[in-house]
Amino acid sequence: MPTILEPGEIEAAASSPPFLHLPPHNLFTLRAARLEQLAEGHALAEYLRLIAGLCRVQQQVFDDPPLTAPFDQQRIEACQQHGLPPFAADTLVREEGWQAYLEALLQRYEPAEQPAVIDAVTTLRVASSGQLRAWAVALVSGQYSMVPAQLVPFLGAALQVAWSHWLLSAPNLQLKPGDSLSQCPACGSPAMAGVIRHRGKHNGLRYLVCSLCACEWHVVRVKCVYCESSKGLDYFSLEDDRHAANQAPIRAEVCPGCNSYLKLVYLENDADAEALSADLSSMLLDMRLAQDGYQRLAPNLLLAPGDE
């Protein structure tokens, strides 16, 4: 029987676990394997397998990164001293360091025999540095309408591997909570989803997963991460052949106060679940909530909103 923590107990427990969990060095391999597993019998199997292949290339770039100038350690330390994200996406995306990761990813990626995929890869390969920067700035700021939809997964994949590599290459990070509960303390990007952990002293605690660098940070449960209200929160899921709705490994925390929601992954119901793959494989839940008038504020950088 899993332990269920009440709000007061959650607040007390939050003082003992670490604020941060850094992603594993084999993050993209884990994502690829999970996506391939989820693709079996899924209505979006072709898309999930496409992203799985892209994740495997991300891992290749992460394991053998491009030669770039070393990250400015003084810059990191200054940001930490002032409580700022040391890998602030809105600043670094305007510099050219991440573009070497895109070039490396495109060199390794072998496009599937799909016109849209071939066109996307070709477009990125011939684009100017200025154009790439403009698209990336739009993507990390959530302005999806300014980025051709077919480019989003490949551009997002390059940004993810760059920021994850920088994050895991930095020694002795001391990060503090951002201005918003949903803001990553490492890069300032918004959370993609939350994970409810299930082991040891972390049992029942929520960590949010960054949409860009995959850093995880603790945020107490039963609180909207956008407006910080605890009133009237509700939880929605889709029943399937394997799980009843109240035991689903993926549920959306819906806030009537700001009319938004955030997906939560419950590891007690699926110990192998992973945030990005869980998010992509549960788009029917997004469609249902959109029909009910709720807005999604959490981005997934491998999917342009409105894509089928």
Image (cartoon, helix red, strand yellow):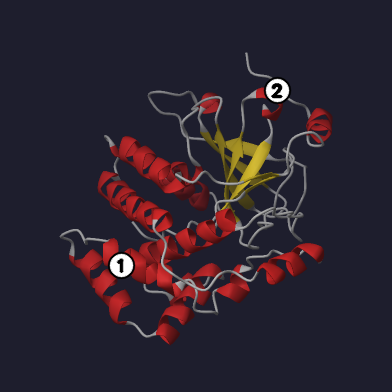
Camera-side residue of 126 and 40: 126
Of badges 1 and 2, nearer the viewer stands 1
Q: Amino acid at mark 2?
A: Ile
At 28% from the left and 70% from the top, the residue drawn is: 120
- Residue 221 x %, y %: 72, 38
Q: Amino acid at mark 1?
A: Leu
Q: Is residue 104 above or below residue 230?
A: below
Marks 1 and 2, how far apart at CA: 46 Å
Q: Callout 1: 10 Å neighbours few (<14), some, many (20+)?
A: many
Which image quarter: residue 182?
Answer: bottom right
Ranked by sequence position, the earlier of labels 1 and 2 is 2
Secondary structure type for disc 2: loop
Asked whether residue 89 appears in the rendered view, the answer is: yes
Camera-side residue of 224 and 49: 49
- Residue 263 x %, y %: 56, 44
Which image quarter: residue 232?
Answer: top right
- Residue 174 x %, y %: 74, 54
At 71% from the left and 26% from the top, the residue drawn is: 201
Residue under numbered circle 2:
4
Secondary structure type for disc 1: helix
Q: Is residue 301 left or right of residue 256?
A: left
Camera-side residue of 241 and 114: 114
Q: Quadrant of the C terminus?
A: bottom left
At 35% from the left and 37% from the top, the residue drawn is: 38
Residue under numbered circle 1:
106
Which image quarter: residue 195?
Answer: top right
- Residue 89 x %, y %: 59, 69
Q: Is residue 180 left or right of residue 36?
A: right
Asked whether residue 304 appears in the rendered view, the answer is: no
Q: Quadrant of the N terminus?
A: top right
